[in-house]
Image (cartoon, rainbow, N blue to C red):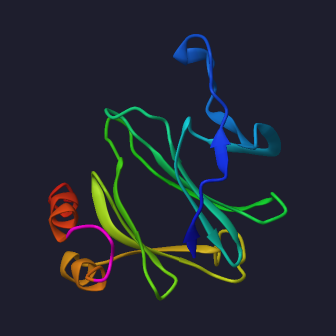
Amino acid sequence: MIRINRYELEKHDGPYDSWGGKSDLLLNGVKTGVRLSGYQLLHQIETPEGVLFITDYDCPFEEVTWFTLVTHEMQVISHRWFGAPYATFLLDDLVLLKSGAINFVLFCGGPYQLTIRKWGVPYLFPRMRFKRIAPDKYLEQLKDSDQPLERKIEALSHAP
């Protein structure tokens, strides 16, 4: 898995209420035919199965974070969101592991580990597997990451 920076989300005009909940995904300014939930593209990660897009609505007071897996042919194959009314599930930390998993912390939850499966059955065996992990295991797995350890401890301090 590698971080990429090829895609962007459309920019919305007018009052926030009129934007709807989704944004067109653009590649070199051209619509790809994929619409992602959210208004801000936080991360884009190329995987063997496709591209993982992580988006949010850019609202720090009541935030929802979306994870959407799209094939290289631009077909959405899996999506999952973290959020709750009157709470913020803002993405605080995200690290790619050498094992192929992704560890992340949300402001009101986590830490979690995301594993992308090669195949899945919708609702029964989804392509994206999210597993809550213990904070000490999270820190142990992240010793080799590019972020300073202080940043990871700060992110964990927001988790319940």
Give the residue drawn at x 20%, y 61%: 151
Q: Residue furthest top?
A: 14
**In the picture, residue 147 is in which quadrant?**
bottom left
- Quarter location, residue 155: bottom left
| For residue 67, side relative to residue 20 (left or right) | left
* Residue 76 or residue 124, whichever sits in front: 76
Question: In the picture, which quadrant includes the N terminus?
Answer: bottom right
62 inside magenta stretch: no
The C terminus is located in which quarter?
Answer: bottom left
Per the rendered image, the range of residues in magenta is 144-148
Q: Nearer the viewer, residue 111 or 27?
A: 27
Going 69% across and 83% down the picture, which residue do you hit?
Answer: 118
Q: Does the magenta stretch mainly form a helix, a strand or a loop?
A: loop
Query: At which x and y percent is residue 84?
Result: 39, 44
The image shows residue 29, relative to residue 147, as above or below, that is above
Residue 71: % across, % down: 77, 66
Q: Is residue 144 above or below residue 63?
A: below
Q: Quadrant of residue 150?
A: bottom left
Number of numbered labels in the structure image: 0
Q: Looking at the image, which residue sits at the far bottom?
A: 99
Residue at position x 67%, y 49% in the image: 7
**67 to the left or right of 112:** right
Which residue is pictured at 53% across the width and 17% down the height? 16
How far from the left and from the top, in percent, is residue 75?
81, 59
In this picture, residue 33 sits left or right of residue 46: right
**Left-right relation of 67 to 110:** right
